[in-house]
């Protein structure tokens, strides 16, 4: 009889309760929120509220609801990326009570509500890119034992998160600067790092007398791009395209590109199977043939939709700031821009449209009053 019951359980599909332990709970009940009435919302008051809950009841009744309420308030208190705050929440869970004592308790998720709460806590850590450490592992081991689901989740995080942390070749500090100019410099450096000779300059629109928008401009251009710009045909206009977006963690920076002519299609009629006239590779002595260097088809700036001759980010991303950017490019070693037409694809801001629509209406009111 017991064998038949076990076979019936093993034949259940994956949608049944054996695998539901891996599903994240979308409904998180929070009956009491002790963080709502805190006058100062910082790390000290957050940890103080956790200590007050621990000292209220030795049995820690309502600890699951308290942890869910604390997780929902972490960003408000500015501790959503603080490892110490997550450790304090794990320490709220009672020790030893949730450790499975046999294989059936381990496989059928002993105390599922508490284990799912700990998994959700680790999931929030992963979403906020908080690296766990060995102390947190020991805390989870004391609460759920070595067969607990939260500890398995922790081990996967400890394996994968260090691999992805330094995967990007563009280093970013843990805390990004609040200055938009510094963020723009970091974004432009990331975009233009494909060319090692790229030069990044910071200009002010006040250098142009006719400018309206007083702001800064972060411009990037290499010597290769200046040569490509000088080869632009006078009858083909340049196009300012954008705004595009680049993400620096949670921050978004908009940038614009100046596009030139479309690169000509490269036609290579060379037969790869023809051995009648072999080319001698450079640096190999004694090889019979003609010494030629490989032909460079195009530069990295020549793309299918056009040649990128400059990149910029402005403080306001307005049309006037982009016009000042073009004039400053002409002022600094790009005199060919004075003879080239430039097309702006940036649509007009909504406030400009409102001003243009309200001015005739105001004049009509004056006429009616007169």
Image (cartoon, rainbow, N blue to C red):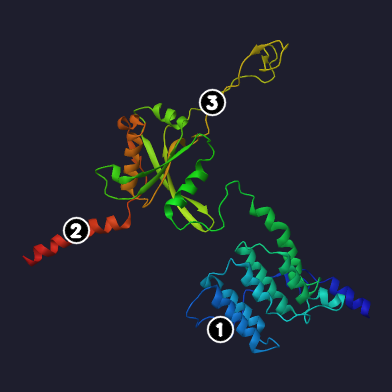
Lower sequence index among marks 2 and 3: 3
Q: How far apart are marks 1 and 2 (CA)?
A: 53 Å
**Vertical order, 40 against 264 (above or below):** below
Lower sequence index among marks 3 and 1: 1
- Identify the residue at image location x=33%, y=34%: 330
Residue 219 on image: x %, y %: 41, 42
Image quarter of the N terminus:
bottom right
**Front-lying residue, 273 or 118:** 118
- Residue at numbered disc 1: 34
- Identify the residue at image location x=51%, y=57%: 176
Residue 113 on image: x %, y %: 71, 79
Q: Residues within 10 Å of mark 3 (few under 14, many from 20)?
A: few
Residue 348 on image: x %, y %: 32, 51
Q: Do the residues labelled 3 and 1 touch (CB within 8 Å)?
A: no
Q: How crowded is mark 2: few (under 14 residues within 10 Å), some or many (20 or more)?
A: few
**Which element is circle 1 on?**
loop
- Identify the residue at image location x=74%, y=68%: 137
Image quarter of the C terminus:
bottom left
- Residue at numbered disc 2: 359
- Residue at numbered disc 3: 266
Residue 15 seen from this side: no
């Amino acid at each position: 009889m017991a064998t038949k019951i076990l076979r019936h359980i093993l034949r259940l599909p994956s949608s049944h309760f054996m695998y539901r332990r891996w599903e994240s709970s979308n409904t998180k009940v929070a009956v009491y929120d002790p963080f709502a009435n805190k006058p100062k919302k910082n790390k000290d008051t957050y940890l103080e509220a956790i200590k007050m809950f621990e000292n209220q009841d030795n049995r820690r009744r309502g600890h699951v609801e308290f942890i869910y309420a604390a997780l929902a308030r972490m960003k408000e208190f500015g501790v959503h990326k603080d490892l110490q705050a997550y450790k304090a929440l794990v320490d709220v869970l009672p020790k030893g009570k949730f450790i499975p004592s046999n294989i059936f308790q381990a496989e059928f998720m002993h105390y599922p509500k508490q284990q799912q709460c700990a998994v959700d806590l680790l999931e929030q850590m992963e979403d906020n890119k908080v690296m766990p450490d060995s102390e947190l592992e020991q805390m989870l081991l004391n609460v759920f034992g070595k067969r607990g689901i939260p500890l398995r989740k922790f081990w996967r995080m400890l394996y994968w998160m260090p691999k992805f942390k330094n995967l990007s070749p563009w280093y970013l500090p843990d805390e990004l600067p609040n200055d938009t100019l510094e963020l723009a410099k970091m974004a432009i450096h990331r975009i233009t790092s494909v060319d090692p000779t790229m030069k990044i300059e910071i200009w002010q629109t006040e250098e142009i007398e006719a400018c309206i928008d007083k702001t800064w401009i972060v411009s990037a251009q290499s010597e290769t791009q200046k040569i490509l710009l000088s080869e632009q045909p006078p009858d083909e206009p340049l196009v300012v395209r954008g705004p595009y977006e680049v993400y620096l963690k949670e921050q978004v920076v908009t940038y614009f590109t100046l596009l030139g002519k479309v690169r000509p299609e490269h036609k290579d009629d060379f037969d790869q199977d023809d051995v009648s006239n072999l080319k001698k590779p450079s640096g190999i002595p004694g090889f019979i043939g003609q010494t030629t260097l490989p032909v460079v088809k195009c530069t990295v700036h020549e793309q299918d939709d056009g040649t990128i001759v400059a990149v910029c980010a402005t403080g306001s991303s307005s049309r006037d700031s982009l016009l000042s950017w073009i004039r400053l490019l002409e002022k600094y070693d790009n005199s060919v821009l004075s003879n080239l037409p430039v097309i702006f694809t940036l649509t007009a801001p909504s406030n400009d449209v409102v001003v243009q629509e309200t001015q005739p209406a105001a004049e009509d009111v004056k006429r009616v009053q007169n």
